[in-house]
């Protein structure tokens, strides 16, 4: 174990993923440099893995704040975590990731290389997306972003980002994704996660980090590796999920982008490109909800519906 001191804090917001959470924490306690503390903000009904997690942390001397029961909602839970930790650098990781043993150490090294302009650093997935060129060209044509090697890392006018799945070197980005984000403490004195976004809060991570990128430099480094398993636990149908995703898309576009003709056209043009893609997906998966959800969602948002929460509508 490297004895280098660390003044960083890790925050994990979780709900009903006990098995995945244990794997994530196990990778954290095996880091070459340990953080000063771990805060788990758990909104689950039960905590079957809590004892095992406490034992893992105790074995390596990692202070653990297991906050349960916590209020439901990813954005709410992450904001709770911010107020419960004291590190100079705060890490947010999903409950279904696996950190390479030197991931934390490599991120800290990147902070050491930069000055006060640096606000945050993210890791890279060791199994990067490599979509076919036709897919990349389609996404560029409609401005709907996606993930591919050496992408621009920039925000498009419709509020979609071109994510860098892999790169030869450190890259500046205008976004981070929630499975691995880190920030200097001072950043979080200016920006917090938007608690108006409920449930799993589609694109809450891009919203928050894009706002940060207007004030600070954000980086992605290929030297720090973190694998995201993308566990699917949503109880929503594809129809309701698409309704909610579109509502969030419109809300965040209005919130973050100029509401000029250029930007509003980019939003609707991008939705057209996504709709064509979803027609293909719906046919392949025999899941019409991917299309009907977009149609209903676009109709609702065109009429000014605003954010929707299907889980509340269904009384769950």
Image (cartoon, grey):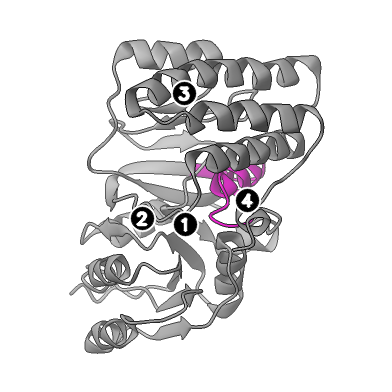
Give the quarter of the figure containing the N terminus: bottom left
Label 3 crowding class (10 Å Cα cut-off): few <14, some 14-19, many 20+? some
Mark positioned earlier in the residue sequence (1 or 4): 1
Residue located at (26% from left, 58% from top): 98
Q: Nearer the viewer, mark 2 or mark 4?
A: 4
Mark positioned earlier in the residue sequence (3 or 2): 2
What is the count of numbered marks? 4
Pointer 1 with pointer 2, Cβ within 8 A: yes
Mark positioned earlier in the residue sequence (4 or 3): 3
How far apart in space, not on screen, are marks 3 and 2 (Cα)?
37 Å
Left or right, 213 with reference to 46: right
Vertical placement of residue 231 versus 18, above or below: above
Q: Nearer the viewer, mark 1 or mark 2?
A: 1
The label number, if any, that marks residue 278 in the structure image: 3
Residue marked by disc 4: 310
Foreground: 300 or 99?
Answer: 300
């Amino acid at each position: 174990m490297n004895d280098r001191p660390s003044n960083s804090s890790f925050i994990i917001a979780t709900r009903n993923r006990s098995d995945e959470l244990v794997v994530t924490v196990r990778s954290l306690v095996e880091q070459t440099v340990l953080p000063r503390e771990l805060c788990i903000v758990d909104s689950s009904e039960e905590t079957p893995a809590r004892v095992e997690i406490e034992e893992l942390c105790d074995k390596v001397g990692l202070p653990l704040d297991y906050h349960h029961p916590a209020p439901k909602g990813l954005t709410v839970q992450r904001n709770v975590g911010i107020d419960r930790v004291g590190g100079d650098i705060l890490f947010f990781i999903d409950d279904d990731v696996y950190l390479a043993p030197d991931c934390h150490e490599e991120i800290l090294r990147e902070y050491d290389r930069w000055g006060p302009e640096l606000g945050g650093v993210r890791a890279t997935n060791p199994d990067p997306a490599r979509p076919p060129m036709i897919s990349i060209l389609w996404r560029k044509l409609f401005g709907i972003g996606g993930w591919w090697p050496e992408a621009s890392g920039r925000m498009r006018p419709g509020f979609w980002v071109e994510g860098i799945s892999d790169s030869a070197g450190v890259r500046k980005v205008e976004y981070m994704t929630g499975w691995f984000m880190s920030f200097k403490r001072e950043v979080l004195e200016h920006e917090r996660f938007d608690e108006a976004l409920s449930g799993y809060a589609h694109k809450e991570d891009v919203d928050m980090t894009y706002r940060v990128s207007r004030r600070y430099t954000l980086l992605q480094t290929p030297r720090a590796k973190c694998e995201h398993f993308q566990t699917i636990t949503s109880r929503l149908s594809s129809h309701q999920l698409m309704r909610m995703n579109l509502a969030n898309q419109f809300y965040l576009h209005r919130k973050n982008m100029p509401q000029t003709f250029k930007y509003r056209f980019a939003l609707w043009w991008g939705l057209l490109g996504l709709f064509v893609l979803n027609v293909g997906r719906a046919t392949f998966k025999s899941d019409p909800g991917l299309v009907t959800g977009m149609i209903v969602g676009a109709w609702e948002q065109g009429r000014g519906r605003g954010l929707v929460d299907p889980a509340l509508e269904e009384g769950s």
